[in-house]
Image (cartoon, rainbow, N blue to C red):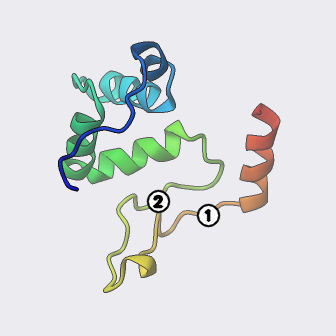
Amino acid sequence: MNDNTALWTPSQERREASRMQAFIHAVNARYDDAIENYSELHHWSVSKPEAFWSLIWEFCGIQGDGPGDTLPQKQKRFQDYQWFPGAQLNFAENLLTLFMFY
């Protein structure tokens, strides 16, 4: 079965309240784009990966010295990629910061 039929679609209200929509608004504000949906966001993210990963670091509120190089260092296997090489962060600090907001 490969007909690409959606099994579930969120309401417009739920989409507008999502973190993905908040990220889309951040992309549009920062880069003066007119992204409206996931498909357009995906296309933007793969066509401008450095901008995407830099904004992900900021949008997620990651605490640390970075993001350093935003593009992952490619390896033969995906699981061996190095994300944000050169960045330094304290994992516990980021977990505790997240805990304080939720």
Q: Nearer the viewer, residue 32 or 79?
A: 79
17 horizontally vs 44: left or right: right
| Mark 2: amino acid | Gly
On the picture, is 18 further left or further right than 30? right
Place of residue 47 in the rendered image (x, y in percent of width and height, measured from the top left) = 18, 49
Kindly identify the residue that appears in the image at 34 percent across and 27 percent down: 30
Mark 1 residue crowding within 10 angstroms, few (<14) / some (14–19) / many (20+)? few
Q: Position of residue 15 (x, y in %)?
A: 43, 22
Crowding near the residue tagged with mark 2, few <14, some 14–19, many ≥20 C-alpha atoms within 10 Å: few
Residue 24 pos. (x, y %): 36, 28
As shown in the figure, which amino acid type bears the numbered disc 1?
A: Gln
- At x 22%, y 41%, the residue is 44
Tell me the residue at 44%/33% (across/down).
20
Toward which corner of the image does residue 10 lie, by quadrant? top left
Image coordinates of residue 48 in percent, x first then y, are 23, 48
Circle nearer the N terminus (2, 1): 2
**Residue pictured at 46% horizontal, 25% vertical:** 22
Labelled pair 2, 1 in contact (Cβ < 8 Å)? yes
Q: Which mark is residue 88?
A: 1
Q: Helix, strand, or loop for circle 2? A: loop
* Disc 2/disc 1 C-alpha distance (Å): 8 Å
Q: Quadrant of residue 33?
A: top left
Position of the N terminus by quadrant: bottom left
Q: Which residue is mark 2?
A: 68
Q: Is 85 above or below relative to 55?
A: below
Give the residue furthest to the top: 13
